[in-house]
Amino acid sequence: MITIENLHKSFGGVEVLKGASLEIRDGEIVALIGPSGEGKSVFLKHVAGLLKPDSGRIVFNGKDLWSLRRSELVGLRSRFGFLFQNGALFDSMTVYDNVAFPLREKTRLREKRVREQVMRELEQVGLTGAEDKYPAQLSGGMAKRAALARALVRSPKIMLFDEPTTGLDPIIVHAIHALIASTHRRFGFSGIIVSHEIPEVFAFVQKVAVMQGGVIRFVGTPAEILETDEPAVRDFIRGSLPSEAYGFREQAPAQPIGNGTSGGAT
Amino acid sequence: MGTPSDRWLLRPVSRVGEYPLSFVGDMGRMGLFLMEALFFTFVPPLKFFRVLKQIRFIGYGSVLVIVLTGAFTGMVLGFQGYSVLSRVGSTAFLGPMVALSLLRELGPVLAALMVTGRAGSAVTAELGIMRNTEQIDAVEIMGLSPFRYFVVPTFLAALISVPLLTAVFDAVGVLGGYLVGGTLLGVNTGTFFGAIKDYVDSEDIAGGLYKSLCFGGLIAWVCCYKGYTAGLGAEGVSRATTQAVVLSSVLILISDYLLTSFLF
């Protein structure tokens, strides 16, 4: 159980988090949605302990993250997986070495076992054959999948996804969502997924939280959020839904100004 | 707070306090950074291959630039020294003059400045980009210390490489001085090197190497700190790199004065 209580955080006098609170039960994935620049990624980095709040608490199974000793914090972090927005792959290492890195550094597995695990994970994310490539040689989708393999290779208990599908084409988006859903079934982790993929992300999360203005405005199931009456949340959700949900008509092509009125430029 | 004209009037006053506060804050953060780097230096495991990789980059990669600057500095010293010493009829002392200038002062300082420009700036830029692309956060989230992987190897590599590069700079510089003094200006070879043997003590050599050891630590400290705390985007990394080179260079010259007054 992860409890985030009343987080406040300012950067250079600008308050980004203004009392954000959220609760995540074991085995539950929460989709954190909301307009851009409202503090979702900052919130996620607080949960991971990468940023220290000005006030408020992050509690893991009754233990406050910031009152842990260094060794306890290291132990807790060993249970984390974090998929960064841009993958955060080590650019001086190949895909294979990137995925093997947590195993080599945090376990005493023999290289043969490491290889088996890395290859299995790469196969899961569809990157077999790309193990010798460097991050700079990967497409955006491949880099995200490689980062996902690295995040999952140690079977984390808590997974945090920071916009795992932003900037990717719909097929890759679908593939990554399917991967997250299947790995969730496989490992049963708890987690938060920051996403703008609405309503696709609702298909595999247990709860949805909407962040607006530095606070969590709404928490509920995917079904509840689609039927909410709260105006700000409803407007955001409607604005995010694909156009066919509202019966948008096909638009005629725009006509160039002055088309057909003159013989051309003079 | 107040009208725009009040703010305009108060701005210079607030700036007066802002700069010292920011300076003191920076010093504190740099001090804590150094403490953490030292902690992970002495707490195993040491990332030995990363240290070797950094020695290759900072040390081996800087040899050419050190040889070139060392040779030309020695040659200039040969010319200038001969010109001055010939006025008082003491050209026999050209060897010690060149060697002592290099060993005690120019070797450690110029070698450190060259390493700052070539390798220190690259270390800052690399760490700055790693910070921006969240690679440092990725290590931290795995329950590992970024200091152990990115900072400690650079510290140790600089502590090992800079004194060795200084020794190369000194040796090549003396040969450069001899090339000009002995070959072009006619100072006797035996006199040149014999006088060096007579007038240069092991203390002169050791003093210069102590200096270069301090400069190596200083370069690694400043350049790693600036990269580790670099601001966002290309502008943040470029500002951090400039600050790292300027601050390292200034601190090298200031600490050179302090070390000279203690060591010699």
Image (cartoon, grey):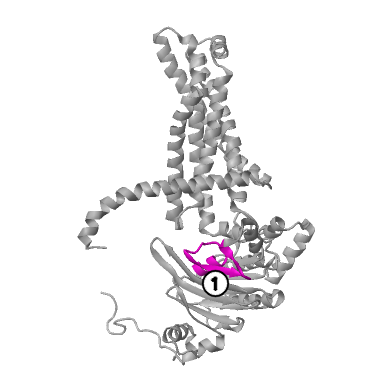
Q: Is residue A25 left or right of residue B263?
A: right
Q: Please say whether residue B117 is one of the residues in the magenta stretch.
A: no
Regarding residue B53, the answer to whether it shows in the image is: no
Q: Residues within 10 Å of mark 1 (few under 14, many from 20)?
A: many
| Element assignment for label 1 | strand
Q: Give the camera-side residue of A101 and B71.
A: A101
Q: Give the camera-side residue of A228 and A104.
A: A228
Residue A87 placement: quadrant? bottom right
Q: Please say whether residue A62 is one of the residues in the magenta stretch.
A: yes
Q: Where's residue B243, x and y in %?
A: 43, 45
The quadrant in which the C terminus of chain A is found is bottom left
Regarding residue B99, the answer to whether it shows in the image is: yes
Count numbered badges in the picture. 1
Q: Where's residue B101, x and y in %?
A: 48, 21
Residue at mark 1: chain = A
Q: Where's residue B47, x and y in %?
A: 67, 47
Q: Compared to B28, does B209 lie above or below?
A: above
Which residue type carries mark 1? Ile
Q: Where's residue B147, x and y in %?
A: 59, 50
What residue range appears in magenta?
A42-66
Q: Give the camera-side residue of A264 and B202.
A: B202
Residue beneath disc 1: A4
Q: Compared to B241, does B192 lie above or below?
A: above
